[in-house]
């Protein structure tokens, strides 16, 4: 799959090349500068998106209008520059300028189509997975593929995300879509609402009675008092995450190390053959 950052990088390069020649009239210059600036701003958003299809589907739909609407500037203004010389005092692009702007137009259209496809695919997958039956899956791999997504959303925060899952941890029996949503909610809420800087460590351990895998979220510098638990699992309708844990046959509990931090624990069920 094409990556938005690559398409935007080429748009920035092509527009910069035309602008550097200083051969456009003032109206053309203004429109091309606007395309160039818009592409640079979108590239700043897109360049840190992890280069996996999974990350694209997790991140692009959440960017919303701030990412999609400016894209119309790129291909819309490029088309005007090529096809509406009367809007620019009758100035016509020369063959080299036309080639560069045509490429900008094509990459802009490709970006818009890619964004739409990723958004629609993610929506249909969400609809499909929302009510899907539990399946057996590797919790370790599931969390690891989400770590780059967490780091993207927290790229401007002084918060370090790490994960530790021992070899041989048995698979769990849940809906992976819901587990991913619960995990992301806990990590991002800790990082954005509970601490200004510090560490969040995600780990998996087999419960002592070997009847469940514990998914643990340790955060430095917090105490799991009533207010913190309210922020995590009650504020603004967040009780749905608590209910979703229960619907996955999981249990939620907490622990606190004085002066160090606190941990949210979610016990997730094992397949019957694992518990037997």
Image: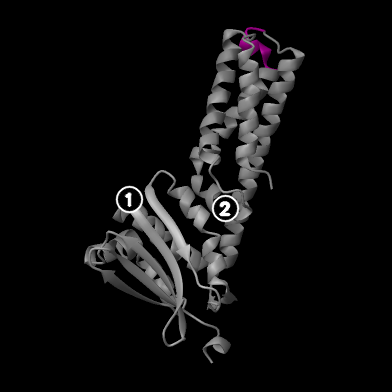
Label the magenta part by its dominant secondary structure. helix
Residue 111 appearing in the image: yes
Q: Which residue is mark 2?
A: 55
The percent position of residue 105, horizontal first and vertical second, equals 68, 28
Residue stretch rendered in magenta on the structure: 83-90
Q: Which residue is mark 1?
A: 197
Query: Is 219 colored magenta in this rendering?
Result: no
Locate the C terminus by quadrant. Answer: bottom right
Marks 1 and 2: which is nearer the front?
1
Side (left or right) of 149 relative to 11:
left
Give the residue at x 43% y 82%.
207
The percent position of residue 127, horizontal first and vertical second, equals 57, 63
Q: Earlier in the sequence, mark 1 or mark 2?
A: 2
Where is residue 183, by image quadrant? bottom left
Distance (Cα) linking label 1 and label 2: 24 Å
The percent position of residue 75, horizontal first and vertical second, equals 64, 29
Side (left or right) of 99 relative to 259:
right
Element type at marker 1? strand
Label 2 Cα neighbours within 10 Å, binned few <14 / some 14-19 / many ≥20: some
Q: Residue furthest bottom?
A: 276
Give the residue at x 33% y 65%.
233
Tags 1 and 2 in contact by the CB under 8 Å rule? Answer: no
Residue 130 appearing in the image: no
Give the residue at x 67% y 35%.
109
Where is residue 264, by image quadrant? bottom left
């Amino acid at each position: 799959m094409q990556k938005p950052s690559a398409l935007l990088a080429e748009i920035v390069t092509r527009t910069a090349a035309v602008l550097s020649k200083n051969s456009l009239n003032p109206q053309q210059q203004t429109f091309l500068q606007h395309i160039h600036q818009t592409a640079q701003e979108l590239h700043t958003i897109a360049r840190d998106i992890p280069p996996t299809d999974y990350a694209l589907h997790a991140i692009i739909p959440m960017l919303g209008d701030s990412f999609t609407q400016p894209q119309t500037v790129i291909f819309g203004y490029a088309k005007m520059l090529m096809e509406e010389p009367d809007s620019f005092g009758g100035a016509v692009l020369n063959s080299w300028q036309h080639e560069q702007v045509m490429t900008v137009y094509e990459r802009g259209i490709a970006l818009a189509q890619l964004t739409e496809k990723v958004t629609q695919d993610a929506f249909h997958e969400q609809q499909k997975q929302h009510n899907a039956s539990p399946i057996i899956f590797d919790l370790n791999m599931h969390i690891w593929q989400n770590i780059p997504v967490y780091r993207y959303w927290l790229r401007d925060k002084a918060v370090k995300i790490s994960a530790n899952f021992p070899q041989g941890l048995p698979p769990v029996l849940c809906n992976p879509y819901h587990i991913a949503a619960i995990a992301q909610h806990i990590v991002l809420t800790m990082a954005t609402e509970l601490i200004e800087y510090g560490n969040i460590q995600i780990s998996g351990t087999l419960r002592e009675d070997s009847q469940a895998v514990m998914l643990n979220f340790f955060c430095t510098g917090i105490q799991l008092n009533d207010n913190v638990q309210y922020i995590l699992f009650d504020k603004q309708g967040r009780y749905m995450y608590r209910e979703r844990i229960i619907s996955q046959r999981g249990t939620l509990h907490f622990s606190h190390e004085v002066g160090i931090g606190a941990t949210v624990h979610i016990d997730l069920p094992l397949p019957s053959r694992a518990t037997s």
